[in-house]
Image (cartoon, rainbow, N blue to C red):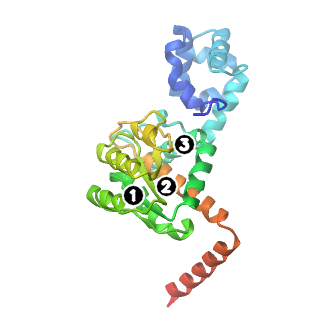
């Protein structure tokens, strides 16, 4: 993540406990258990609810990088406006449909907000430039990542070049082996450690093809191998019922790339897209 960015509030809350005093950890527990109470309370009210002193609440707030409790409370209110943080929306077996609906939306929204905060616009710009310089795109990914690859392939009209998302690793290999020098390889893996994906990326490098990666961390093997790494951080966890939010965030990043490329291709491309859209509307009505 670029050094000039401040991590999202939940990120700071998740990482804060080891550095907190025992009394400050009680404030953290209250925030994680009942964040809306904290938003609606004064510093004295939070201190009473957490059974600590008001100076402890102030120290807790400043330890997270805020000037004081009021600034922390406002930041927490903004976070809650996007939905409860992912760590507070764990699904329970007794949850009814309305509760499940709220928790899944909360988890998804907070995860997308994290992805937005971490996505490097400079990396996006470099990836757009690489697409514009390519004559075709090969997209590879397993499982949920394959869904992202297929979605990107469907946006070939926006990218303005042929896009393929082969079904299996053998087809990945053949596509890369037969690719022209101007082909761009887009490798998608949230873990960034899928062996077959890494092998194909290495094969692409052996053929001197450029590689763009969509991955969940800037410290994955895939990120280190790629020429351009788009880091798509989400609150993915091991909860049995948690939706695959990394897939949703990846789809959003594909939309960003496709839209940016289409805009950069200029007015002639825009007119072609408009004619296509108009014709497609008529075709659907026939």
The picture quadrant where one finds residue 118 is: top right
Residue, disc 2: 251
Rendered location of residue 275, percent (x, y): 62, 81
Depth check: 189 or 67 in front? 189
Residue 234, position in %: x, y? Answer: 48, 40
Foreground of the two, 114 or 148: 148
Q: Secondary structure at mark 1?
A: helix
Name which quarter of the figure residue 60 lies in. top right
Q: Which quarter of the rendering shows the N terminus?
A: top right
Q: Is residue 176 above or below residue 233?
A: below
Graded by Cα atoms within 10 Å as few (under 14), some (14 to 19) or many (20 or more), the crowding at tag 1 reads some
Task: Using the image, determine if residue 286 lies above or below residue 135.
Answer: below
Question: Disc 3 versus disc 1: distance between alpha carbons?
Answer: 18 Å
Q: Which residue is mark 3?
A: 115
Kindly report the distance in space between the C-alpha atoms of the residues bearing marks 3 and 2.
Answer: 11 Å
Q: Which residue in the rendered view is the most extreme toward the bottom?
A: 286
Point out residue 114 in the picture as x, y percentages from the top left corner: 55, 39
How dense is the environment of label 2, judged by Cα within 10 Å: few (below 14), some, or many (20 and up)? some
Question: Pointers 2 and 1 in contact (CB under 8 A)?
Answer: yes
Q: Which residue is found at the position 57% from the left and 59% from the top?
A: 133
Q: Return the residue found at the far left.
A: 170
Reading the chain from its start, which is encountered first: label 3 or label 2?
3
Q: If you read the primary sequence from the N terminus, does the residue marked by circle 2 or circle 1 appear first?
A: 1
Of marks 3 and 1, which one's residue comes earlier in the chain?
3
How packed mark 3 is, by other alpha carbons closer than 10 Å (few <14, some 14-19, many 20 or more), is many
Residue behind mark 1: 147
Q: Do callouts 3 and 1 mark residues in contact (Cβ within 8 Å)? A: no
């Amino acid at each position: 993540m670029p050094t000039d960015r401040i991590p999202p509030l939940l990120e700071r809350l998740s990482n804060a406990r080891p550095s907190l005093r025992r009394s400050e950890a009680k404030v953290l527990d209250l925030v994680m258990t009942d964040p809306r109470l904290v938003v609606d309370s004064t510093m004295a009210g939070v201190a009473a609810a957490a059974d600590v002193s008001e100076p402890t609440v102030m120290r807790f707030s400043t330890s997270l990088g805020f000037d004081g409790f009021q600034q922390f409370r406002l930041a927490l209110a903004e976070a809650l406006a996007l939905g409860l943080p992912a760590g507070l929306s764990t699904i329970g077996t007794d949850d009814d449909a309305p509760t499940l609906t709220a928790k899944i939306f909360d988890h998804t929204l907070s995860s997308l907000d994290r992805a937005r905060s971490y996505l490097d616009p400079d990396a996006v710009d470099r990836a757009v430039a690489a697409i514009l310089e390519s004559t075709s795109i090969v997209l590879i990914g397993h499982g949920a990542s394959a869904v992202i690859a297929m979605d990107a392939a469907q946006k070939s009209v926006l990218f303005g070049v042929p896009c393929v998302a082969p079904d299996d690793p053998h087809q990945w290999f053949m596509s890369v082996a037969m690719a022209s020098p101007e082909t761009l390889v887009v490798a998608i893996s949230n873990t960034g450690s899928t062996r077959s994906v890494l092998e194909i990326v290495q094969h692409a490098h052996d053929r001197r093809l450029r590689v763009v990666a969509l991955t969940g961390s800037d410290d994955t093997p895939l990120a280190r191998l790629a020429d351009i790494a788009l880091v798509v951080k989400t609150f993915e966890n091991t909860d049995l019922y948690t939706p695959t939010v990394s897939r949703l965030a990846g789809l959003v990043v594909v939309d960003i790339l496709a839209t940016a490329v289409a805009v950069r291709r200029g007015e002639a491309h825009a007119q072609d897209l408009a004619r296509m859209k108009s014709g497609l509307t008529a075709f659907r009505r026939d």
